Image (cartoon, rainbow, N blue to C red):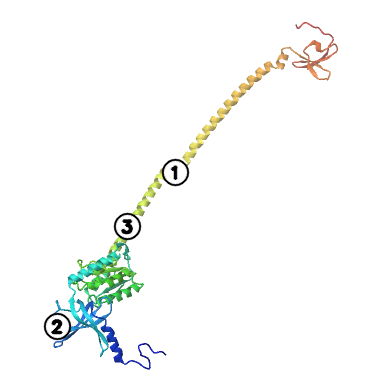
Amino acid sequence: MTAPKDGSSPDNAWPVRTVARKIADWVHRLGTVWVEGQVTQISARPGTSTAFLTLRDPSADVSMTVTCPTGLLRSVEPPLRDGASIVVQAKPTFFLGRGTISLRATEIRSVGIGELLARIERLRKLLGAEGLFARERKRRLPFLPKGIGLITGRASAAERDVLVNAHARWPSARIQVLNTAVQGVQAVPQILRALSTLDRDPGVEVIVIARGGGSVEDLLPFSDEALCRAVAAAGTPVVSAIGHEPDTPLLDHVADLRCSTPTDAGKRIVPDVAEESQRVRQMRDRGRRALHGWVDTQRRLLDQIRSRPVLADPFAPIERRHDDIGRHREHGRRAILSTLSSEQSALASARARLTALGPAATLTRGYAVVQFSDAGGNLKVLRSVSEIEDGTPLRVRVADGAVTATITGVEEGEGR
């Protein structure tokens, strides 16, 4: 195996002191840095020249030890206490004997209320510009969530207010409580873990983050950037119930619903069973009245239809039509008879005229029709004496029959 360039190898390993010295050289080359965090532990024993404190990141489970002269610690105004936000100018230091890294502070500045508020305002503008406060991204709470997650302090008034008011409105509401720190350096990491746990639970449909009122410093965790972004990214609707009406941490703007107090949150996450029961009764009464009104309207409509003559006496129109048919039939019969009589009279008159003008009537007055046979044997009416000669057979037709005769002589000129 080829040895590394630094000269260490399994056969030529460095002593612990060498490694520690090299690490110390690397750390010491970092130089002076400005560090911001929250104070969690302060140790300044009387008679000692060095004070110790722990500086913790409020948004992560990370901390470092800070050492400083006791006089520097005592000169800070106002005096430092646990949970205070400070800015430290320090140089990273590696202690060879213990193999630990700490920060050696040369200056400590307290972050005042004005600076905290200014930082919150800057963060407010940043998150607002990113759209985390937009109304359209906020989700509506379910009407009756099957499960509710509550993140609050252990045995706190906020927990009691949410539980009492929610169960008073809906006794069967299922509320899962996760107790966390709600102020100090442990608050943000614990709330983030609780939020992640409840957000992964499919049985939780609403998450409530609740805390009673407090000072600006006490409510700082609820304006933390990491917490605000985690709430905005949560898949479950989040309700913010922090402090009292004047308290407005950034969490109120990011949450899907802001409640003025934990008591208000307990009233808004579940419906009121009494109000809903009353609403059901009202809807039932309205439905009953509407149905009765519809039935009454239809009944009156049926009565009106049934009172019409065609339905009151259905045979009367038929009888009237029967009488009309009888009258029309009689009228048609008389019209036909009148027409037949008129036509018969006209026919008789025509027959009489025809009879008077016909040959039979002429024959009855004494006239006769004389016919002779031509060369072809056909009978022809004799119109002139020149058409016959003596011996020609004739047929003489009179009114009541016909006789035959033979020409015995012809006399001309009498008819002229």
* Image location of residue 77, percent across then percent down: 14, 77
Amino acid type, mark 3: Asp
The quadrant in which the C terminus is found is: top right
Q: Is residue 338 left or right of residue 87?
A: right
The quadrant in which the N terminus is found is: bottom left
Q: What residue is pinned by disc 3?
A: 285
Q: What residue is pinned by disc 2?
A: 71
Q: What residue is pinned by disc 1?
A: 311
How far apart, in angstroms, are the residues tagged by discs 2 and 3? Answer: 79 Å
Of residues 351 and 220, which is closer to you in this image?
220
Say above or below: 370 vs 64: above
Name which quarter of the figure residue 169 lies in.
bottom left
Of residues 183 and 311, which is closer to you in this image?
183
The kind of secondary structure element at disc 2 is helix
Of residues 40 and 144, which is closer to you in this image?
40
The furthest residue to the right:
391
